[in-house]
Image: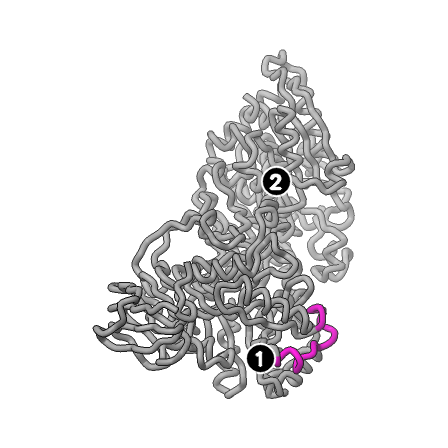
Amino acid sequence: MKNINNNLLDLDSLSKKQIENILSSAKNMEDIFYNKSKNTLSIPNKTIAGLFFEPSTRTRISFEHASNLLGIKYIDLSLNDSSIKKGESLLNTALTLQAMKVDGLVLRHPHSGAPYSLLGKINTPIINAGDGTHAHPCQALTDLYTAKKHFGKIQGLSILIVGDILYSRVARSNILGFSKLGAKVKICAPATLLPQSLLTSNTNGIHSKISVFTDLQEAMVNSNIVMPLRIQKERQIKGHLPSFSEYNSIYGINNKILELANSNVMVMHPGPMNEGVEIDPVVAHGEKSLIEKQVENGISVKMAILHKILT
Amino acid sequence: MENILITQGRTIDCTQNLDSVMDIFISNGKITKLEPKISNFPENTTIISAKNMIVSPGFIDMHCHLREPGYTKKETIYSATKSAAKGGFTTICAMPNTKPTMDNKSTIELVLEKAKTNGLIRVLPIAAATKKRAGNELTNMHELSKLGVIGFSDDGDPIESPNMMRQALSYSLSTNLPIINHCEVKELSSNGVMNEGFTSMLLGLTGIPNSSEDSMVARDISLAETTGGKLHIAHASTSGTMELIKLAKDKGLNVTCEVTPHHLTLTDKFIFNKSNKAKDTDILSSNPYDTNIKVAPPLRSQKDVDSLIQGLLNDTIDVIATDHAPHTNSDKNCTFEEAANGISNLETALSSVLSLYHQKSIPITKIIEKLTSSPAKLINRPDLGSLKLNTNADITIFDPNLEWIVNSNKFASKGKNTPLDGEKVKGKVIKTIFKGKIIE
């Protein structure tokens, strides 16, 4: 439990049991969130600093909200704040906050591995709120929680992640998380958006068990969860895709393609969505969507993470 | 000048096909005797017992970054030559990415002058191939060749324009010096920071595919064929490069290449050696994003390493060169993406390549050939890399079996950036003799 007590950097270093502990703690937090039970879990006299080197709305706001619900003071230091704008290094910014005796850092950074670069240099616990294209453990835990809540268990589920796998930290963490809890993980994208090593099965461990598709119809079969990822305009400019319309016609998630999946299929999306590109708005806001639930559950899961890190 | 007698070392000199236990007598900076047993020597002779050690011509490094002028926080000619001597090198070739760039007579004269006054060993400059290494206009190659430069290179940057590369290969022909190219199609590297593969996927780091190197090597070989020019490929890192160079050599083209100790011995998975990330356990105390492994070209796959070893054995690779690239702590104390490329290499190069000898992949004589006689030939210096009588006494004595733990804080180099810090290695230089003088 050393890792989660001190830092939450990714799911690779957490055991199945440790992940399940966070999910069950999130269940307790949910009762506080929905005001169902008296808040006996609040942690007063603690301060968390949110350090966002990259724009973020929902992660940032939900951490602030989760902190407030637990009575934790939340300091927000974002992209527009002076020290970050002036180009002060990540390490110096972290050292400054440590000197101010904050009890934890929530870090979002555009560079993969950024939180790891602080290890051994600061003692303040770090929660990775997304590093480059590497990991987003908070989102993955939220997605696991949401799936578990809806389906009752993760074991035996078949989850299909569709889209920009190459650049997605959410996909990377979800592959680890869903695999560890016994789900079957499938990924599907045009080859230009798949890591070459997955395409050629040059893998080992968890990753050797995932199924890789370029044909969405084939990939859809038996899926219980379908998770399209946001497609950015940049992918077209850099040559990964010819056009949004072609992408939508082949990889867009709509009600028709969902008919090929398991009849109990649900759709999740880590947000923000590009409606009409990777997902049809009818699906996004329809009865098969868990997308709003993901946002809602994000609060309880972040409360659970904060509680683990700070107590 | 003192007399030195080196006794009973296993003496290896590829220029004389020599590999036997010998005594060497050095007088007035020259090797004057090389015999199985020397009993007659003057009284004022320093005797070095080399029993159970290997005695070799001083190593020659064709690819080194000395950082002076311009970046003396990273390294100076003094600290680089001291570091080189500690690593067994008596000749090092200085790459031109200095500030100002070594693209003109006066900067190169400055380097030579500094080397003469501050340097502990021989420094031979490599001039830029194009002005300011910008890839647009050739340097005054004829003028620079007269200063004793050993080749032309735009160093860490490839000569991107195919036409400029063609002109460089063609124009340099009459200087009889090679164009040394860093082969990398930058558009294919697309800001990558490590080898493209499973490891880069796991870490979410942008990968550099082998094709980024291979495609430019292929282009350059084709241009060497067109022009008849002399082409030297810097730091070969891929199996594709090996296949292409072998093809070029079979065709009889003027193409040579070098390999670094790190590309011969480490793969991209080495990033996990120092962390437990791959083992699915606690990663708190370790950082799988050790910026000290960041180097260009990146550490590749086992398949590539195997083919480089093969290339060394079958002479597809001509020389081992360190690509010694010292950096300050702050150049590396940042995120992986921000970190500078390069490894401080001079002091660990020998032990790295000796690991291949200890694992019986490469004979010791082959390693010595690639560190001595072969680079001497490539830089047109038949007087170097040899223990022949009356040559300069540039000699390296090393214990191939001595185990030690790398401690970068003890490096003579200002660059402490090595992924081997804390690693146990085998093989250490005991004495480096330059022009008959023991370098301390």
Q: Which residues are magenta?
A: B131-146
Q: Are marks 1 and 2 on the same chain?
A: no
Q: Mark 2 = which residue?
A: A136
Q: Quadrant of the N terminus of chain B?
A: bottom left
Residue B296's x, y, as percent?
A: 57, 61
Q: Position of residue B41 (x, y in %)?
A: 26, 72
Q: With respect to residue A262, does B415 lie above or below?
A: below
Q: Which residue is mark 1?
A: B178
Q: Which residue is at 62% across, 87% downward?
A: B174
The C terminus of chain B is located in which quarter?
A: bottom left
Helix, strand or loop for disc 1: loop
Residue B166 located left or right of residue A119: right
- As for residue A276 lying within the magenta part, the answer is no
The relative height of residue A33 versus residue B288 in the rendered view (above or below) is above
Check disc 1 and give the amino acid type.
Pro
Q: Chain of mark 2?
A: A
> Residue at left 63%, top 67%?
B110
Q: What kind of element bears circle 2? A: loop
